Image (spheres, rainbow, N blue to C red):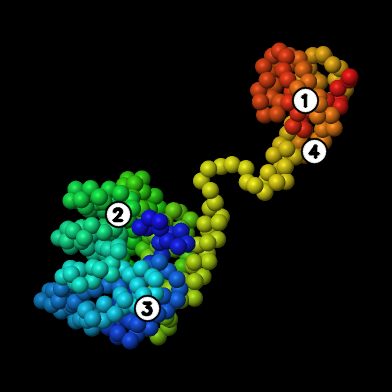
Amino acid sequence: MGNFKGKFGPLLIAEIGGNHEGDFEYAKKLTRLAIDTNVDYIKFQIYTGDSLVSKLESPIRNQHFKKFELSNEQHLELAKMVTDAGIGYMSSVWDTDAMSWIDSFIPIYKIGSGDLTAYPVIKKTLKKEKPIIISTGLSTEKEVLECIEYIQMINPLYKSRDMLAILQCTSMYPILPSDAHLNVMAEFKKLTNLTVGYSDHTEGSQALKYAIALGAEILEFHFTDAREGKSFRDHKVSLTPNEVKELINEIKLINSLKGELIKKPTQIELDHAHEISFRRAVYPKRDIKKGEIINEDSLTINSGALLVVQNTSASGTKLTVTDHMTINGTLVQTGDANILLNGTYDPSFASK
């Protein structure tokens, strides 16, 4: 299985992120609930207020993130909870010094939208030589392509779609459906040939379902126990445990409806012989004498009836064709032709 393949098709990432609001007991509760949904990965954010936001330039935001901090030991305990349950652990490691103690738990690194242009952070992440998922909120197409070019220049390993993935994302909480821009995924795939997906900030799960139908190979969504009574903005765009389970059922249905890539008759069509009974075939309008020249006036094209051939020993009866015609799906040229029986010509009509 590839790095970005999920149990149900797309890789499903339930992001607890900052929804614990710095409460470790609540973080553990959310982790247990997320484990129970059977997603592929549970994602966190590792940072300190001082390493993420300047307390001189943005003192209010600095204090906000300080309130949401968890200790190194608490992050490690959450990581162990997740991996012990057989679920993948993932994190946006905004404090790059934390890579030294959390790396052993992380099979895939996530670069958040705000760090797409933070090349020193990206460069340090690249040194781990692990698969990377990058969100693209706030970015122009040019910035996204420049970031990919930089990553692949530093390490050509990331030219593989099994090592680098790009998520369409809009960095606002919540966003209107018209701001999701799911079509960007197709353009990313065409321009980069990398794995593409969608990081959702709409309310509900509709955008996630449509993203799957449009080819998303990764889905990232925020996760909470309940939206009611919560003041932190991320809860509003989060899915609850039951909603995640419903999403998984919808994904199974969508995958079933999408079916196979190559067009061919389905087994149920073949089992009911519909390729014969639904398609038109050549039938004689009247009795045809042996050796008679067959022309368009001798034949008709009908559908809906399956002829039962009684005299299969007549297979290969020689008939003379005066014009090009299609018999049994094959173009027959002027001259003698052997008509192979498959129910489209019944020799019992012919005079003996």
**Tag 4 secondary structure:** loop
Q: Residue 155: image x %, image y %?
A: 20, 50
Relative to residue 345, is residue 157 drawn left or right?
A: left
Separation of residues labelled 2 and 3 (CA atoms): 26 Å
Of the numbered discs 2 and 3, the one sitting upstream in the chain is: 3
Residue underneath mark 2? 164
Q: Residue 126: image x %, image y %?
A: 20, 58
Specify few, some or many for label 3: CA neighbours under 10 Å numbering under 14, 14-19, or 20 or more.
many
Separation of residues labelled 1 and 4 (CA atoms): 20 Å
Residue underneath mark 4? 305
Specify few, some or many for label 1: CA neighbours under 10 Å numbering under 14, 14-19, or 20 or more.
some
Tell me the kind of residue under disc 3.
Answer: Thr
> Which numbered dot is residue 31?
3
The reply to whether the C-beta atoms of the residues labelled 2 and 4 are less than 8 Å apart is no
Residue underneath mark 1? 315
Separation of residues labelled 1 and 3 (CA atoms): 70 Å
Residue depth check, mark 3 versus mark 4: number of the one nearer the observer: 3
Residue 56 lies, with reference to residue 110, above or below; the image says below
**Tag 1 secondary structure:** loop
Residue depth check, mark 2 versus mark 1: number of the one nearer the observer: 1
The reply to whether the C-beta atoms of the residues labelled 3 and 4 are less than 8 Å apart is no
Tell me the kind of residue under disc 2.
Answer: Leu
